[in-house]
Image (tube, rainbow, N blue to C red):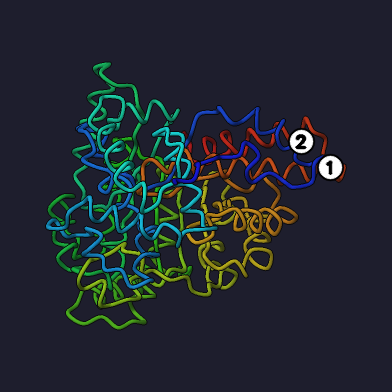
Amino acid sequence: MPRPLLLSPDRLFPSDPAQRDIARRLYREVAGLPIVSPHGHTDPSWFAGNAPFGNAAELLLHPDHYVFRMLYSQGISLDALGIRNAAADPRESWRLFAQNYHLFRGTPSRMWMDWVFAEAFGFEVQFSAETSDLYYDRITEALATDAFRPRALFDRFGIEVIATTEGPLDTLEHHAVIRAANASGEWAGRVITAYRPDPVIDPEFEGFRDNLKRFSDLSGEDAFSYAGYLAAHRGRRAFFAEMGATSTDHGHPTAATADLSVAEAEALFDRVTGAEVSAADAELFRAHMLTVMAGMSLDDGLVMQIHPGAFRNHNRWLFTHYGRDKGADIPTATDYVHALRPLLGRYGNEAALTIILFTLDETSYARELAPLAGHYPALKLGPAWWFHDSPEGMRRFRSQMTETAGFYNTVGFNDDTRAFLSIPARHDVARRIDCGFLAGLVAEHRMEEWEAAELAADLSYNLAKAAYKL
């Protein structure tokens, strides 16, 4: 007999009755606020074409590396799950997911998925091997209806704006279609892009020299000369801004920055565009370009996001066979105090510049990041990210960051996901956790409840809009 699927209205609230009552009151004020999703990886073609999603596996399993990395860790092949395997039967892949759903007990993925199943699709019984076909059929049938097309879901979830992330070699044709739909009145949904230049900034990125050739072709500049290369970035950034971008994003392996002279930078550029690139030169070039990108952001107003500390594609076999973003990126220890000093020495005191720092290294919270953001006008702290986008991760972030950085040197929440339907679930988790944290401050008489209510709205909505210039 299937077990009932129940979402408690008090989930994630404090167990203490007095604090729980405060959290409930705070949450009621923010639960219905629009969603601002200023950084993520949903596919803009979904909103441009507005075609139906194909089936349950295509929508909820294949794009979500949080899900299939757990399954892979238990020896389940990605081929069987249909990851880059068009020959796989999606119903069988879904059954495999259902048979192993117990692996997600206690994880954020379980929380997000249960929200999607209950709130988006109306299920009243738990997902399991026994209910796999029921889920697959009902979800797939729903996806064939107009109510579950991408634009309808966007509107249903109360999304005010969502940012996708594209590389400098992207022509942004899907964003052009969306903008045309906005201009004609066909659809009012706001979908913007963000400039992620890693493929032409990281000399160790696969196909780097070929990428520079395409960079030259798209920009009309000679990206194999240092001056032309910088001009190409300026031109592409301007194009992205015209297409709605308000931010850039930089996913470097470390937070290292450097501030080289023009002569030093030109000599380094000649080396990294050569046939052989040393690891030291690659790191120095990435470091220098973070400082260069900060200078360009000061000029053109794009908010700069730095996402360091992920050892990308740690599983080389998996990368070779399945490509990037397949759940094999692993956090590493990250220094910020010394690494960022060259950039901050140049631009850290510029109040007109916004640099949003993220981390996968929680040991840096109270020791490095909170003091840095609590001092430099240019710095803000991004929310608990990736492996720490979880109830416990969010609580650790608030408890360790707030005393030194305060709330207003942070930027609210962003979901940073490819899994479209998890977006409202993730924002709901963040709002519940923040209301619970604020309820504790109220209960300890460290804050008045009216202040906590204002803060809850800021953390849920206002800070992200302001930080990302939305």
Residue assigned mark 1: 443
C-alpha distance separating marks 2 and 1: 8 Å
Q: Are marks 2 and 1 in contact (CB under 8 Å)?
A: yes
At a point 68% along the width and 64% down the height, the residue shown is: 366
Position of 224 with respect to 346 (left or right) is left
Which sits in the foreground, 215 or 11?
11
Amino acid type of the residue tagged 2 in the rendering: Ile
* Relative vertical location of residue 157 with respect to residue 238 in this rendering, above or below: above
Which sits in the foreground, 161 or 442?
442
Which sits in the foreground, 123 or 448?
123
The image quadrant that residue 403 belongs to is bottom right
Q: Residue furthest top?
A: 185
The image quadrant that residue 326 belongs to is bottom left
The image quadrant that residue 368 belongs to is bottom right
Numbered tag placed on residue 337 in the rendering = none
Residue assigned mark 2: 22
At a point 29% along the width and 54% down the height, the residue shown is: 95
Amino acid type of the residue tagged 1 in the rendering: Ala
Which sits in the foreground, 430 or 75?
75
State how many labels appear. 2
Q: Is residue 228 in view from this perspective?
A: no
